[in-house]
Image (spheres, helix red, strand yellow):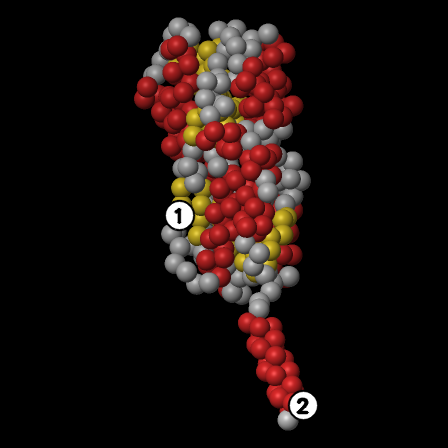
Amino acid sequence: MKIKLLLSLLSVSVCLCAGVAVAQTKPLNIAVIIKATDSDFWQYMAIGAENYAKEHPNVKVTLFGPPSESDVDKQVAILENVITKKPDGILIASTSSDAAVPAIEDAMQKGIPVVTADNRVKTKKVAAFLATDNLKAGALAADKLVEVLKAANKGLKGKIALISAYAGNEVLVNRDEGFSKRLKEIAPDLQILPVRYVDNDIQKAMASASDLLLANPDLLGFFGDNNHTGDGVSLALRSSGKAGKVPAVAFDSDPEEIKALSDGVLSALVLQDPYGMGYKGVDFVVKAINKEKLPEYTDTGVAVVTKANMDDEKMKGLLNPNILKK
């Protein structure tokens, strides 16, 4: 009788264990494709994505990305290869609004939800899109530059230099347009010189900014529309002896920009939230996998940081998401 009871209990135990095994599921495999591995900005997005996975054991994040933002074809090839591995979902910050469209639509057709971040791709066949409102962000940069010029009694009549990472990139086009339109509204006598495009290369940005300073000794200020252009402008201002004399506002953050802001070489940084793009982006992918309804577009926000507020708690994580890494 005791033997039969023991066998019965063992049988129940095996069934319960089997039931648990059936109930367990493997972690969702999310592929996160950033624009470039050579930029702190995209590494910040990666930190956000990885932190989400660390906080949610049922999610596994695998990171991919080309060396540079100029490697459009390489990023498309990475995306195509990722799709063949059949992940549960994809988060991508596409370098191009057009080039990745066929692969993204292919993934969606195969039941792999795709969430896009930062750059809007020209297809409605995505699960969701989250990014900065770059027209608004560019306008904030113009507001801050004019504020700095007024505070320094520089006057609002003269030349402004705009250093852009790329020509034709939708994110930067909107950012530069927002800056230019707002500047015309609030300081119509400020003239923006022809835009210098530098292939997202810090040394080229430095050379362009140096050339502009030499050719225009009366130059009133700079706008750099991403972190690499901000780095180049700050290096040019340092080497020319114009640091602190010619105001400069730039986008995003990296160690060089943070030091330049602290030293007074850069007057302000307009900060996006790449960490949030990664964290919220993976969350959106998970929700898309679970067939939850998502907003078509989510504004990830923007903030302006100066030397005066860079040590505020709410700014520290935006300036350097490395401190948020788990």
Mark 1, secondary structure of its residue: strand
- What residue is pinned by disc 1? 297
Q: Position of residue 47 (x, y in %)?
A: 58, 42
- What residue is pinned by disc 2? 3
Q: Quadrant of residue 127?
A: bottom left
Mark 2, secondary structure of its residue: helix
Observer-nearest of 101 and 108: 108
Q: Amino acid at mark 1?
A: Tyr
- Choose the circle earlier in sequence order: 2 or 1: 2
Q: Amino acid at mark 2?
A: Ile
Q: Quadrant of the C terminus?
A: top right
Residue at left offset 39%, top offset 51%: 296
Give the number of the mark in front: 2 or 1.
Answer: 2
Q: Quick check: can you spot residue 209?
A: no
Observer-nearest of 68 and 261: 261
Q: Is residue 151 left or right of residue 29?
A: left
